[in-house]
Image: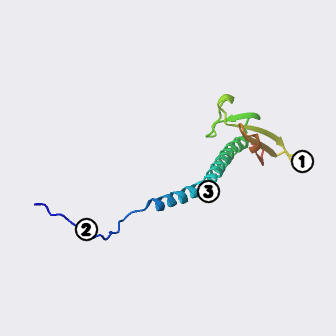
């Protein structure tokens, strides 16, 4: 035999969210995300600029070492994203190097490097260093 449960007319409290509460919370969350979306673009741009600066500094360091050893060729050089020398078709960076003896001092050489990411000529970096002439 089955027992029937009769309700006495009182409503029991239910757990969970009402439709109004869920709608309000979704509205607040979407407003928060919409205010943060522009920061994502700024962060991506900053990361890209920082990566290019790090790459150009690495390329400059390797070219300065070559210049100190006396093995650096002047003119336009091409590099990939990792800073390895490459051909013009696979290049991500171009480097212009000039070596000049210091005026009045024959034992010192001035080297100037201009490293430019391809496609963004306004982000060119210029490095200059003075070192003794390799023997």
Among numbered discs 3 and 2, the one appearing first in the sequence: 2
- Dot 2 crowding, Cα within 10 Å, few <14, some 14–19, many 20+: few
In what element is the residue under mark 1?
loop
Please give the label number shown on residue 35.
3
Identity of the residue drawn at 75% across and 34% down: 76
In what element is the residue under mark 3?
helix
* Residue indicated by mark 1: 104
Whole-percent x, y for residue 32 in the image: 57, 58
Q: Is residue 79 left or right of residue 74?
A: left
In what element is the residue under mark 2?
loop
Give the camera-side residue of 66 and 55: 55
Among numbered discs 2 and 1, the one appearing first in the sequence: 2
Whole-percent x, y for residue 102 in the image: 85, 46
Identity of the residue drawn at 65% across and 45% down: 55
Among numbered discs 3 and 1, the one appearing first in the sequence: 3
Disc 3 + disc 1, Cβ < 8 Å = no
Badge count: 3
Spot the residue most to the front: 9
Q: Is residue 43 left or right of residue 109?
A: left
Please give the label number shown on residue 55.
none
Whole-percent x, y for residue 8 in the image: 26, 71
* Distance from Cα at disc 3 to Cα at disc 2: 49 Å
Q: Quadrant of the C terminus?
A: top right
Q: Choose mark 2 or mark 1, whichever is in front.
A: 2
- Dot 1 crowding, Cα within 10 Å, few <14, some 14–19, many 20+: few
Identity of the residue drawn at 55% across and 55% down: 30
Please give the label number shown on residue 7.
2
* Distance from Cα at disc 3 to Cα at disc 1: 60 Å
């Amino acid at each position: 035999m089955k027992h029937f449960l009769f309700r006495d007319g009182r409503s029991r409290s239910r757990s969970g969210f009402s439709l109004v509460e869920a709608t309000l919370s979704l509205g607040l969350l979407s407003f928060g995300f919409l205010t943060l979306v522009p920061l994502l673009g700024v962060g991506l741009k900053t990361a890209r600029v920082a990566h290019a600066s790090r790459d150009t500094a690495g390329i400059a360091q390797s070219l300065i070492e070559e210049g100190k050893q006396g093995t650096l060729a002047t003119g336009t050089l091409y590099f990939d994203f990792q800073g390895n020398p490459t051909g013009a078709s696979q290049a991500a960076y171009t480097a212009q190097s000039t070596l000049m003896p210091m005026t009045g001092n024959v034992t010192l050489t001035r080297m100037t490097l201009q490293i430019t990411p391809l496609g963004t000529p306004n982000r060119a970096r210029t490095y200059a260093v003075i070192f003794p002439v390799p023997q």
